[in-house]
Amino acid sequence: MTFLPIVERELRVAARRPGTYRTRWFAAMGMMAVWLLLFAVNRRVSAAELNKTVFTALGILALGGCLLAGMFLTADCLSEEKREGTIGLLFLTDLRGYDVVLGKLVATSVHSVYGLLAMLPVLALPLMMGGVTVGEFWRVVLVLVATLFLSLSMGMFVSAAVRDARQAMAGTLLGLVVMAGLPPALRWLGFILFHVWPAGVVVWPSSVCAFVAALDAAYRGYNGAYDFWMSLLTASGVSLGLLVAAAVWLPRAWQEKPGGIHRGGAVVRPSDQGSVPSLHGRARLPRSPGANPYLWLASRARSSDPLARLLLGLLLVLWLCFLSTAMVLDDGKSAFVLCLFTAYAVHQIGKYLVALEATRQLSEDRRSGALELLLVTPLPEGQILFDQKQALIERSRGLQRVLLLVNAGMCLAVLARPKQLSMSSTDQAIFLEIFLGGTLVLFLDFKTLQTVGTWMALRARRHHRAVLGTLGRVMLVPWAGVFMLVFLVMTRTFQPSEIKLSVTFGLWFMAGILTDLVSNARARAGLKRGLRFWVAGSETAEQQTSHAHGPWASVGLNA
Amino acid sequence: MNEPPIPAVQTFGLTRMYGSIAAVYKLDLTVNKGDLFGFIGSNGAGKTTTLRILATFLAPSAGTAKILGRDVVLEADAVRHVIGYMPDFFGVYKDMEVTEYLDFFGACYKIPTAQREKTVNDVLELVGLTEKKGALIGALSRGMQQRLGLARVLIHDPQLLLLDEPASGLDPRARIEMMAILQELQRLGKTIIISSHILSELQTLCNRVAIIEKGRLIYSGAVQGVRDQVSQGQVVWARVSSDQTQATDLLKARKEIAEVTVADGEIKVTLAGPDIEHSIVADILVHGGAKLMELREDEVGLEEVFMRVTRGDTQ
């Protein structure tokens, strides 16, 4: 078996990389900080109950991290090598598909496995302090390991199947949403419509349901143990299946099909080349760049790839199902709650797609060297950045409209069916505040994601890191806010009156807006240093910082 | 009184530091208009850094560089109009058609739309890519992509071409064709600075060269000049049909001859000084009764020159 040498080599490389240790340190410290915060704010519940809730909350955080790992770690690892033509070199040796897939899996998953290992001691603290059983702890650990494996395998599978980075990341997210989120959503929908819980088998593939089933309350319930183990087996089986499929597929998929050249994310066959399909959506771009060549360049590719559209479409269909159920049924409260969560998910996916798009063009151009070629033309840097901004605004307009429609739909439900949703006029006012505030934040988030994404595309060495950096800078604070709010309500630490709840949401929006403003200002300051500053590399950048005070500054962004 | 012509490139004390390492150190270089100038050095010698500074992509840490009298830092925008820079990577958009790519860069150089189509056709013809104008770039071979890179460089009719390893990775035919294109461009009046590892080609192509090592200039001047500098000992090869031992004895007996050795049936004669005429070897042999068949000067190739003047140090 020749995969062991690759694994050994990759582990040696990882051992030399400071990032390996940094990830572990940050994961442990982050988890510790959340643990301390949760303990500090809780005063109303017993120690055992508190430990249990903290354990659940930390478990949810870890589960989220494990679920997203594949999207940022493995999703583009094979597709990137396919794009650069280096994967073929591996298949010229005696290596087989499984050697490459397993070697790559080890190489890309070291950080996430170390991160998870670093989290476990913090997760075990509630176990030692009481309130959590040993069995419960290990079951949750098993779910986390299985979820990480599933996420990484999903990334490998999608990466083996596609070439484009955006498609790889969106496809992995789609796979994970279908596996982890769709089964419980469908089960809930079935229950709301028919008042009977569909069989547990429906949710076996879902890591979210496996996590719930791992907790003592569910595990000790009717069929709980059976459902838990079957769920774990299903997730592991699917993961293995995905890896096998990737190993079988990769040797067949790495070669470019005869004449199949990727054009703006779409494959163009020789027969198509006479009439190249529209790559620009409904608004066809002129074939020739006019006065703004970079605007033309950044607007060429499809506004989003098919997998991203499929993912968004799937969530929108679910949202529409819940919304119509909530509006049609006499007691639509449960459906409305699910509709609310789905709408939130649609918004987050939309924002992820904006981050993906904002980082794409400059990241690709920087990597291929095309940006360096552009920077030695008389095209001013300020013009490139302006055109990039205009292109992003234009390309995200459709998505923004869809998300606005979602908010409008939610407002309509609140205003038109208050009785069916058991809402008082104060409840209505609070929900309207959420949806209207969400609309304001939506505009700001889009703008900020576009600016920060442009900056991160110049800073990060790889596209997926640029996306992660963008989301981290813009969305981390609002996500932490939601997490804390849900946790505090769960532990009954926060039992607000309607007025207080309204103020809390107001503060949450303010925190989001403030984060947007700060992130936007930082990104703009970064971009003002000029594209050359970032493109010429970090060492070069340091040199240029000292030089930027001299005459060079005048040919930077202001040129 | 006529003013001296402005050189195409002039650098004074050009320095570029990366931390404590000097990629380029106090480089004084002059390239005249119309030169086909070879820029020679080992990997990491500082060639690419110098070309990137001249292309206005990198700022120098110290010193100045002027292109056709314009400072690359203070007048970067004006400089960009007169240079064409081709780095050692393609930097192409693989999903674009050949004409789209050139059209795009034409727009970047603000060539009017009406004029662009003709310009694109002209440069494609010049580099021999007319038949591929509708092809997607990703489908082109490496050599064709290299030609496309050259076409991009020429799209705005620059006066100075900065070409970093333009023939690297090309097959012999593509390399010869690339060199022919460069000669044609020189004939059209372009000044060309070309960095390359294929010294034998630079030897025939370039009229002037610069040799750089560890960021420092070792030699700059005419190709023949550096050859003369290296072969200061003056070596002459002689072939005789008579007794070779007698011939070597005749030569060794004279004080004008420093060393005589025999290699591959030929007599290698090293003259004692640079001012001694080569014909003295013929005189000695003929007057001594040896039958001289052939007498030729030692040809010092650029590769040998490079090996002698550099130590192979990189940073």
Image: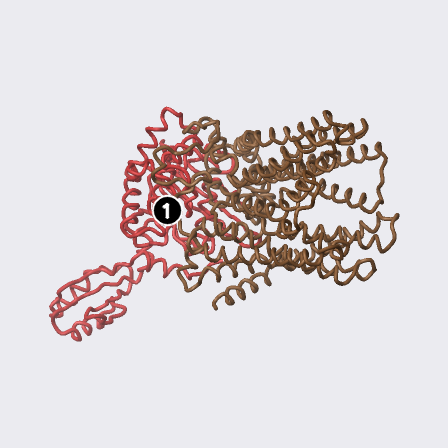
Chain colours: A brown, B red
**Closer-to-camera residue (B73/B98):** B98
Q: Is residue B294 above or below residue B60?
A: below
Horizontally, is A410 left or right of A350 in the view? Answer: right
Q: Which residue is denoted by mark 1 in the rendering?
A: B194
- Residue A130's x, y, as percent? 83, 60
Q: Quadrant of the C terminus of chain A?
A: top right
Chain name for mark 1: B
* Amino acid at the residue labelled 1: Ile
**Closer-to-camera residue (A20/A167):** A167
Residue B93 at least partly seen: no
Residue B54 image-quadrant placement: top left
Residue B314 at least partly seen: yes
Horizontally, is A374 left or right of A328 in the view? Answer: left
Residue sitting at x 79%, y 52%:
A54
Q: Quick one: SS at disc 1? A: strand
Residue B255 image-quadrant placement: bottom left
- Residue A524's x, y, as percent? 63, 35
Q: Is residue A303 above or below residue B18?
A: above
Horizontally, is A107 left or right of B235 in the view? Answer: right
Count the marks: how many?
Answer: 1
How many residues crowd mark 1 within 10 Å: few (<14), some (14–19), many (20+)?
Answer: many
- Residue B97's x, y, as percent? 38, 37
- Residue A428's x, y, as percent? 77, 28
Q: Is residue A341 above or below residue A206?
A: above
